[in-house]
């Protein structure tokens, strides 16, 4: 049931000693609540259909400030304001009056013998049935909140459906959306700090019909939901970073993370590189979007591994945040992570240079066509150099074993019967002798070709 008391009826009551100063064209608006406020931004606390009562303590004194005050209050749906005639209110400028007339925003004046409480009680009494409706709305609000699954709580669409209001909860530090559609939310008309595990704010969109009472209860509900979502996301971010760093050190394989549940059915994944500057924002946004956040800082960039739908979410999140991204080719084993990271970093550099949002590494496929023995000998000499000598057999066999085991250092060390430290020492000697490293994609291709040529000569 709509409110029946209008501003025109309110000022017609002689007991209230209230008259119109400006904005008379808006006097036919219904009033469902009257609230005092001396805040500089009362539109953050009052909602549509509510009358602002003030003695002007926070009212701007300059014409431009008073004009903006009227514009913001009117845009918030506040039906008007009444100021007390007690000498505290600064002079109301002509610019403010003109803006009120243009907006149809009534500015009223209440005599010094009329307490604002009398006006508030008059409005409340006239809208008793409306208050009953508000209680019913609150009951439905709490009931609906208890029925939402995590995905529905994350989207916040149930609030829009129930309250006809566009709301979002935003992480204050990163700007990532905790509750709401999308990754980032444009600032709404009203913003309220929430008591969550990390600073967040509730953003209420323009055109919202939320009244002050409903807003207070909605803040409590969304604080609880946001806390649950944030705690889960932050735990996933920490776990994902630890797992990826362990993978980069060769400590785990791809099936050691959630038993491989993060992988698509084909078992392939890609490495993605993004600017390091947006790391915290990206990791939180990815986790809140429902993707597995396997990200860490590496080589001055943000490095992530993702598969299937998570890769799509990661790419979408990067684009929504305005960050470029670079992707490696498809990978099947963590043993290839060093080379895949180089691919992703190269692709990121390509994306930045081309001012494109995304780039995928496209390395040329190479193959050794041993058309002659002399060709194989030339490849061995050019790539291996001193490593082809007989006295370098231990270094050469260590390199070939590492290539045979797809760069899995532990498997290589076990196969050779040596410690990983010994293997690392030998590979440093290989790099010193050949000028090539197994950690560079371009060098890795040449070393693989040299190994194939060596095997061809040995045969």
Image (cartoon, helix red, strand yellow):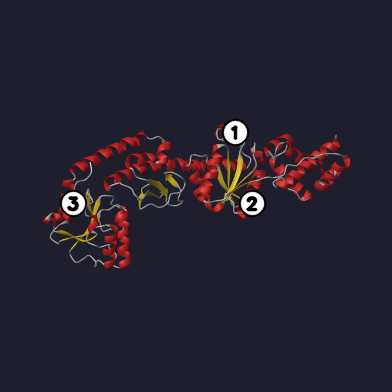
- The residue under label 1 is 255
- Residue 331 appears in the figure: yes
Instruction: Give the number of marks.
Output: 3
Q: Where 103 falls versus 292 (above or below)?
A: below
C-beta proximity under 8 Å, tags 1 and 2: no
Name the element at disc 3. Answer: helix
Dot 1 or dot 3, earlier in sequence:
3
Q: The N terminus appears in which quarter of the rendering?
A: top left
**Left or right of 102: which side holds 171?**
right
Q: Where 86 falls versus 283 (above or below)?
A: below
C-beta proximity under 8 Å, tags 2 and 3: no
Residue situated in front as seen by the camera: 204 or 267: 204
> What x and y, as percent, mark residue 297?
57, 49
> What x and y, as percent, mark residue 108?
20, 59
Q: The C terminus appears in which quarter of the rendering?
A: top right
- The residue under label 3 is 120
Label 3: few (<14), some or many (≥20) within 10 Å? some
Q: Calculate the distance from the C-alpha at mark 2 to the C-alpha at mark 3.
A: 64 Å
- Which is more foreground, mark 1 or mark 3? 3
Q: Calculate the distance from the C-alpha at mark 1 to the C-alpha at mark 2.
A: 31 Å
Name the element at disc 2. Answer: helix
Residue situated in front as seen by the camera: 15 or 332: 15
Label 1: few (<14), some or many (≥20) within 10 Å? some
- Residue 396 appears in the figure: no
Residue situated in front as seen by the camera: 219 or 159: 159
Q: Which residue is at 29% across, 66% downward?
A: 95
Q: Calculate the distance from the C-alpha at mark 1 to the C-alpha at mark 3.
A: 65 Å
**Left or right of 401: which side holds 297?**
left
User: Splitting the image into 4 quarters, where does residue 16 fall?
Assistant: bottom left
> What x and y, as percent, mark residue 270?
61, 41
- The residue under label 2 is 350
């Amino acid at each position: 049931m709509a409110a029946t008391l209008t501003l025109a009826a309110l000022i017609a009551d002689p007991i209230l000693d209230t008259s119109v100063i400006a904005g008379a064209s808006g006097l036919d608006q219904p009033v469902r609540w009257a609230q005092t406020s001396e805040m500089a931004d009362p539109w953050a606390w009052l909602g549509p259909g509510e009358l602002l009562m003030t003695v002007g303590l926070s009212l701007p004194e300059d014409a431009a400030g008073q004009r903006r005050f009227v514009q913001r209050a009117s845009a918030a749906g506040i039906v008007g304001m009444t100021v007390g005639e007690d000498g505290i209110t600064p002079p109301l400028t002509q610019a403010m009056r003109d803006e009120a007339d243009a907006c149809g925003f009534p500015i009223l004046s209440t005599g010094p013998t009329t307490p604002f409480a009398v006006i508030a009680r008059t409005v409340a009494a006239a809208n008793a049935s409306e208050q009953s409706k508000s209680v019913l709305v609150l009951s439905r609000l709490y009931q609906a909140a208890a029925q939402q699954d995590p995905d529905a709580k994350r989207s916040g669409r149930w609030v829009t459906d129930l309250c006809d209001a566009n709301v979002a909860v935003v992480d204050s530090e990163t700007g990532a959306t905790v509750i709401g559609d999308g990754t980032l939310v444009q600032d709404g008309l009203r913003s309220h700090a929430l008591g969550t595990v990390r600073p967040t704010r509730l953003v209420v969109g323009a055109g919202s019909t939320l009244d002050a009472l409903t807003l207070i209860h909605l803040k409590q509900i969304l604080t609880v939901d946001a806390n649950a979502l944030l705690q889960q996301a932050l735990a996933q971010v920490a776990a994902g970073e630890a797992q990826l760093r362990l993978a980069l050190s060769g400590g785990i394989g791809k099936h050691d993370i959630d038993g491989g549940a993060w992988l698509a059915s084909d078992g392939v994944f890609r490495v993605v590189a993004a600017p390091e500057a947006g790391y915290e924002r990206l990791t939180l946004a990815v986790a809140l979007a429902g993707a597995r956040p396997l990200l860490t800082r590496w080589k001055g960039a943000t490095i992530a591994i993702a598969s299937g739908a998570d890769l799509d979410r990661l790419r979408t999140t990067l684009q929504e945040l305005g960050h470029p991204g670079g992707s490696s080719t498809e990978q099947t084993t963590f043993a290839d992570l060093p080379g895949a990271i180089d691919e992703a970093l190269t692709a990121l550099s390509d994306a930045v240079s081309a001012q494109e949002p995304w780039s995928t590494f496209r390395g040329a496929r190479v193959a050794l066509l041993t058309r002659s023995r002399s060709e194989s000998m030339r490849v061995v000499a050019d790539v291996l150099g001193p490593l082809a000598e007989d006295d370098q057999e231990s270094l050469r066999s260590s390199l070939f074993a590492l290539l045979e085991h797809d760069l899995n250092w532990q498997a290589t060390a076990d196969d050779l019967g040596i410690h990983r430290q010994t293997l690392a020492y030998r590979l440093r000697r290989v790099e010193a002798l050949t000028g090539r490293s197994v950690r560079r994609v371009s060098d890795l291709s040449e070393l693989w070709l040299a190994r194939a040529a060596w095997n061809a000569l040995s045969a």
